[in-house]
Amino acid sequence: MKAGEGRLAPRANDGDIAAQGRGTEEGNVGQAAADIVGDTARPRGRATHRQLSPVSPIETPVIAAAELGSRGWGGHMDTTHQIEAVNRVLSTIKRDVGDPAGWDFVRFYPHSLALGIIDAIWSVRVTSGEVVRVVSHYAAYRRDEGANPDTDTASDLLGTFTTLGLGGWIDRIGNRQRTFAALTAPEKADAVRRAAKILVDAGIETPADLSTVVARASDTERSVESAWRSIPGETSGLTWRRLSLVTGAYELPPSPWLTQYIAQAVGHATPQESQTILDEAATRLGVAPMALRQAIWHHEAMVHPSSALDSGR
């Protein structure tokens, strides 16, 4: 199963894909590093530095009952509760993550598990610019080698450590940031290496492979997630969930951490209701559902960096 098929997003209308990056150093990340904004997918040529496409400021749009008449809402909410639920979630999103035009943390790597792994590991406790910088350095290194980073597999990523060594990888691509705030914590570069090996050993090389594993909700997924979360500094599950979001391998209906976020805003929501509310909220905001999920992940990671998403599936 490819990313985006069946119960996995993104769907065909999941966003305007534009390259992520700030400043000339981070600009040439590549087509795989993307911001998803708007409601139509328009693949571009080779990516260059771009800001997010302009989006109108959030004004907490209010939904009328007539607008919901033919939308096929799932779950057990009646129309009145549906309207109230979406409006409450829109207010919560405005409070928690602000205007979509400022969502510089939204990125997407539809064909490169290598870039997704780097982004996921580096995204905790740092600015978006720092993440983009490391991803950009990796992409530049791979292009210098004659490779295409936008389609790099987990094995390709692991191979760069074989070529450069951990120290060389840090000097050429990464930095000395650690997975948590302690001198004994491993460097993020080492966590990237370990994570890549875990996926390679499980036969997961591409975002499509990861999507298939997630869709099956099998022992393989549980085993791989457990191994990933055994890496020092990755036990909360934050980076594992980030990996699924930036590669399009996230679950439909939503995982418990997303359902919990929606439920806190509306009082109660089933996973199916949460999915519908998220999709409707994304439509009202003019962003892709994937972008909204990443925005909520970012908020939860900032508010609860040591425990967010720790509830597993």
Image: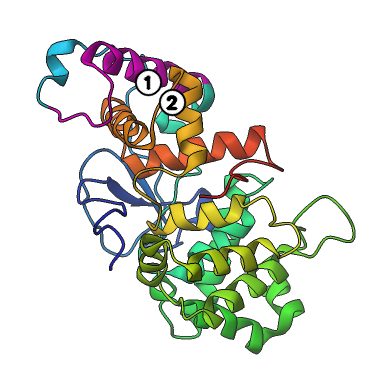
Residue drawn at 11 percent across, 19 percent down: 69
Task: Name above or below for residue 133 compared with residue 220.
Answer: above
Left or right of residue 245, residue 67 in this image: left
Please give the range of residues in magenta: 71-95
Q: Which residue is mark 2?
A: 99
**Residue 89 screen position, x and y as percent:** 41, 21
Residue drawn at 55 percent across, 58 percent down: 119
Quadrant hosting residue 175:
bottom right
Rounded to the nearest angstrom, the CA distance separating label 2 from label 1 is 6 Å
Figure colour scheme:
rainbow
Q: Which image quadrant: the N terminus?
A: bottom left
**Is the Cβ of the residue at disc 2 closer than 8 Å to that at disc 1?**
yes
Q: Name the residue at the bottom extreme.
A: 163
Q: Is residue 193 visible?
A: yes
**Residue 30 screen position, x and y as percent:** 40, 64
Quadrant hosting residue 40:
top left
Q: Amino acid at mark 1?
A: Pro
Left or right of residue 173, residue 101 in this image: left
- Local secondary structure at mark 1: loop
**Residue 280 screen position, x and y as percent:** 27, 29
Q: Amino acid at mark 2?
A: Asp
Q: Which residue is mark 1?
A: 57
Left or right of residue 127, residue 82 in this image: left
**Residue 80 screen position, x and y as percent:** 25, 10
Q: Earlier in the sequence, mark 2 or mark 1?
A: 1
Residue drawn at 60 percent across, 62 percent down: 134
